[in-house]
Amino acid sequence: MNEKTHLIFMSDLLEENGKTVMENNLEKEHKYPIGEIVEVTMGFGIGWSCDGIVKDDEGKEICLGLKEGTVVLYVVDHQRDCDGTPLYSLSDLKCKYPSYAKTFSEEWKCYRSFCNHFYHGIGEEDLKPVGHRITLYNTFQEYMGF
């Protein structure tokens, strides 16, 4: 018996509207813009660590860092999963993530070395908006002032 095996990726499954999972996911916009301040609960225990006080665009002070298993961070980049699902990069650095930079490039290493917290590939169902937004620096060089 010589049967052919068919491999179907989850992203290629058809949904009720006749489009694939990926087609539907790619039509979804990112819910949280770059600069949004969000909370995300992490699985690394309970504690408190305020890594810095920042002011949002209206001047309200927000504490970034770990708070009872929850981290309050900036949305610094948008990505998509292999099936097109919107994902986010979060950081405590007030600067957009250099997603264009090659991994382990000097710019990438500098950015990561200045972060106390950086998380990549976080789904929007894990995020809770704090209700504040800030304007981020566009590049690491601008953030550092050179």
Image (tube, rainbow, N blue to C red):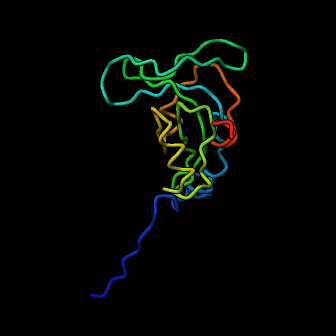
Horizontal and vertical percent for residue 133? 67, 24
Horizontal and vertical percent for residue 76? 60, 38
x 52%, y 55%: residue: 83
x 67%, y 19%: residue: 56
Q: Quadrant of residue 34?
A: top right
Quadrant of the frame with the N terminus: bottom left
Foreground residue among 50 and 24: 50
Foreground residue among 116 and 144: 144
Horizontal and vertical percent for residue 131? 63, 19
x 50%, y 39%: residue: 123
Foreground residue among 126 and 65: 65
Q: Quadrant of residue 58?
A: top right
Q: Is residue 47 left or right of residue 88?
A: left
x 47%, y 22%: residue: 51
Q: Tell me if residue 10 comes above or below residue 62 in the rendering.
A: below
Q: Tell me if residue 4 comes above or below residue 141 in the rendering.
A: below
Q: Tell me if residue 90 comes above or below residue 6 in the rendering.
A: above
